[in-house]
Image (tube, rainbow, N blue to C red):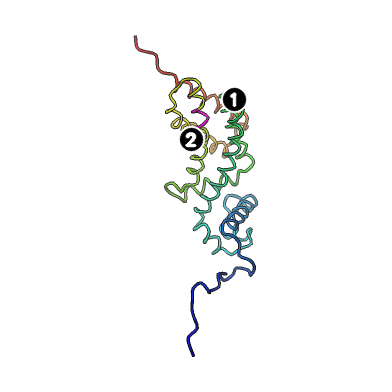
Amino acid sequence: MAAMSRDPEQRPTRRRGRPPGPTVDREQRRVVLLEGAERAIRRIGADASMDDIASEAGITKPILYDHFGDKAGLAAALADRVAEGIRVRLAEVFTREADPRTLTHDGIASFLEFIQTEPELYQFLVQGMLLSSGSSVPQRRLISRLGTEIGESLRRHLEQTGGDMALAEPLSFAIIGSIVVAAEWWVASRTIDAASLADVLTALVWDGVGAATVPPAASP
């Protein structure tokens, strides 16, 4: 009797432990898993384990690892997802017709509002930073997205005021860096409210931007 063909293309694609049914697009499954991760983190806290997240998503832990590699990989994917949500918020702020200082204040307030409404998710991203390195660090990915958004607003401002547009990028990352560090302190201490912190940070970064973009007076 001839041996049966073992064409790899004819092998079942469903993995052990995966329920029968139509194949789910990998990207769609990834979105579902991230939504489950967010629910688990909100319910359990920033210390939610991969077991907790897999349980919330209704899957086995190996499937979670298959999509994200490890907890740091999951945190990086969540950072991308969160950064896009914040980027949309900031885009709505910075495209309004208002003076640059007001836009800066409202952008900072929007970021703080996210932290205030999603403290556990934010802490999870910060913890992910300690598990990662290089460009995959979740917080760096978040900072990069936000810094780019602020940089575009600064570039428009410098263009309108005749300033040096090459300063937009370094200033934008200096601004978002100071905001993120201050936000980490604020999450732990909460000694002032979000509105007061937004006012203080606006005064700090706006005065700093003004000083950095005005050429020094010529020496006598």
Q: Which residue is mark 1?
A: 102
Q: How many marks?
A: 2
**Foreground of the two, 31 or 180:** 31
Q: Amino acid at mark 1?
A: Thr
Q: Which is nearer the N-term, disc 1 or disc 2?
A: 1
Report the residue that reaches farthest toward the top: 220
Categorize mark 1 by other alpha carbons within 10 Å: few (<14), some (14-19), many (20+): some
Q: Position of residue 15 (x, y in %)?
A: 56, 69
Write the residue at 42% across / 47% down: 134
Taking the image as shown, residue 196 lies to the left or right of residue 72, namely right
The stretch in magenta equals 151-155
Write the residue at 61% across / 34% down: 92
Q: Position of residue 175 (x, y in %)?
A: 49, 31
Q: CA distance from mark 1 to mark 2?
A: 19 Å
Q: Amino acid at mark 2?
A: Gly
Residue 177 is marked as 2
Report the residue that reaches farthest toward the front: 2
Write the residue at 46% across / 20% down: 162
Report the residue that reaches farthest toward the left: 220
Q: Position of residue 127 (x, y in %)?
A: 51, 48
